[in-house]
Image (cartoon, helix red, strand yellow):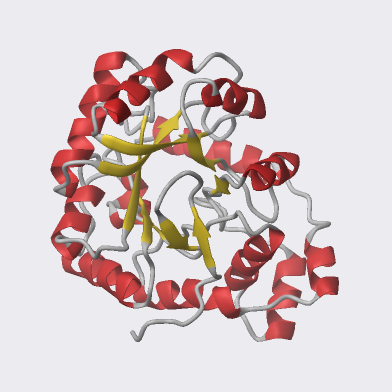
Amino acid sequence: MTKQTDLGGSFKLPGTSLTVNRMGYGAMQLAGPQVWGPPRDVEAAIAVLREAVAAGVNHIDTSDFYGPHVTNKIIKQALHPYPDDLVIVSKVGARRGPDKSWPHALSRQELIDAVHDNLRNLGLDKLDVVNLRVGGLLAPSEGSIEEPLTVLSDLKRQGLIQHIGLSNISPRQLTEAQKITEIVCVQNAYNVAHRDDDAFIDKLAKQGIAYVPFFPLGGFIPLQFSALDATAVSLQATPMQVSLAWLLQRSPNILLIPGTSSPQHLRENLSAATLKLPPDVIAALGSIESSWAATLAGSMRAQTNHE
């Protein structure tokens, strides 16, 4: 795949020398089913990563608890030594239980071990950005994050982490975090059907902080709405392309990390960066309301309980 000229423009992470194209890639789906174990076809996963980078993607989101210890090894196998402009963002704060659950892992030693796991499996001596994952399954849960964030701040001073972000957090927790260290990005659940963070995104934009929606296409429950379907038909696009284009046009500080193990879906996702939505379409999509988050949470719990 030839390098695209437009991946939604670029964004410079605040207080850093890191500039990324707004359309990136999320590595979670490189692992096996339910983000557990190796993929069915490792060579295909490697090919998707290489095609993404060849197309101009220079922002990859990952974690060593994907698999666990699977996606980072595939990233290293596919791309190491890494291109100079590639920014790899990982996350810590969770682990995978034997039942494929996602419990917190926020103790000092768990966080230190997680950072070293990421370094080892990615083949790096320092991590570009590490997101501290807190909160519940899909949404923030209020409470102090000072203790785990102080651990990451210490690792940053040691040179193992260059920059710190947050995942599954509230505006109040961001304020607390900024008293401890600089925050370059926030990663929360958000898409055209789940917009609890509308005001938060605008607040972050004023501070120049990146907002990175996870599950931008619905995650394990793909977005399905008549408004998306009708818009896609009118624009000769797919509903998923429309969803991604809406996010890119929602705010200039939004960075996208749609994940896929399919080369065809990768190309479709990247092409969404060139899809311009008319104002009336943006307004129509803005009126979508759904119980997406509750449906997804129920699905994930059911999957855990039956495996």
- Quadrant assignment for the N terminus: bottom left
Residue 6 appears left or right of 40: right
Residue 229 appears left or right of 68: right
Q: Which residue is drawn at 49% across and 18% down?
A: 145
Image location (x, y in percent) of residue 152? 35, 25
Q: Can residue 115 be seen in this view?
A: yes
Asked if 295 appears above or below 48 in the picture, the reply is above
Residue 192 appears left or right of 263: right
Residue 287 appears left or right of 174: right
Marker count (numbered): 0
Q: Which residue is drawn at 28% across and 52% down?
A: 31
Q: Can residue 291 be seen in this view?
A: no
Q: Which residue is drawn at 36% across and 70% down?
A: 262
* Front residue of 49 and 119: 119
Image location (x, y in percent) of residue 187? 52, 42
Q: Splitting the image into 4 quarters, where does residue 111 fall?
A: top left
- Quadrant assignment for the C terminus: top left
Image location (x, y in percent) of residue 178? 54, 26
* Front residue of 209 and 247: 209
Q: Residue at x 64, y 53 (%)?
A: 191
Image location (x, y in percent) of residue 269? 49, 71
Q: Splitting the image into 4 quarters, where does residue 273 fall?
A: bottom right
